[in-house]
């Protein structure tokens, strides 16, 4: 399941797993459940933590924690980002993506955690810490 955000990179399209920031007092699992519902219309539960990435690209510095999830209900739909105004939404599409689809996407059009993923084990067996090396790191 990937969400396409427009205007967040040079190519115009950026496919990423659903997610976002925490509301004060919210657990990581509560935030992920909320973000999935907001962005995709799907109700999920959180299964297990997979890996952590660190993203540093001006103006954003984020620690991203990835989980395996289980879908329970809901209708897949293009959701919204409540932090943005109605006329400034960045989510343009949501879809279930096969590993073949992922391979066909250009690297610049997908989240760095999805680079070099060609089969389920490449993603679901990934664990540990993976920093994103941005232009500011070079």
Image (cartoon, helix red, strand yellow):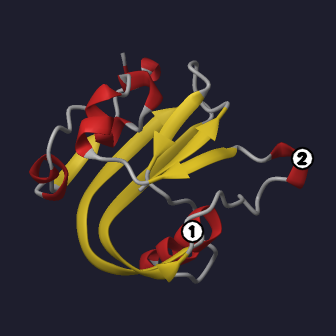
Which structural element holds mark 1? helix
3D distance between C-alphas at marks 1 and 2: 20 Å
Tell me where residue 120 appears, x and y as whole percent: 15, 52
Q: Is residue 88 left or right of residue 71?
A: right
Q: Is residue 95 visible?
A: yes
Q: Residues within 10 Å of mark 1 (few under 14, many from 20)?
A: many
> Residue at position x 87%, y 54% from top?
86
Quarter the C terminus occupies: top left
> Residue at position x 65%, y 57% from top?
78
Which quarter of the picture shows residue 101? top left
> Residue at position x 89%, y 46% from top?
87
Whether 70 is drawn above or below 90: the answer is below
- Read off the residue under disc 1: 35
Whether 89 is drawn above or below 106: the answer is below
| Closest to the observer, 39 or 85 | 39
| Closest to the observer, 3 or 47 | 3
Which structural element holds mark 2? helix
Quarter the N terminus occupies: bottom left
Q: Is residue 50 left or right of residue 97?
A: left
Q: Which mark is residue 87?
A: 2
Q: Are marks 1 and 2 in contact (CB under 8 Å)?
A: no
Q: Earlier in the sequence, mark 1 or mark 2?
A: 1
């Amino acid at each position: 399941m990937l969400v396409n955000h427009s205007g967040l990179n040079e190519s115009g399209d950026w496919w990423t797993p659903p997610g976002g920031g925490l509301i004060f007092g919210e657990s990581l699992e509560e935030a992920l459940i909320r973000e999935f519902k907001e962005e995709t219309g799907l109700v999920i539960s959180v299964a297990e933590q997979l890996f952590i990435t660190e993203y540093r690209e001006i103006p954003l510095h984020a620690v991203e924690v990835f989980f395996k999830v289980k879908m329970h209900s809901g209708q897949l739909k293009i959701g919204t980002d409540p932090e943005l105004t109605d006329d400034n939404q960045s989510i343009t599409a949501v879809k279930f993506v096969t590993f073949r689809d992922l391979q066909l996407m250009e690297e610049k059009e997908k989240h760095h955690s999805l680079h070099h993923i060609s089969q389920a084990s490449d993603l679901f067996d990934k664990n540990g810490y993976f920093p994103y090396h941005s232009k500011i790191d070079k």
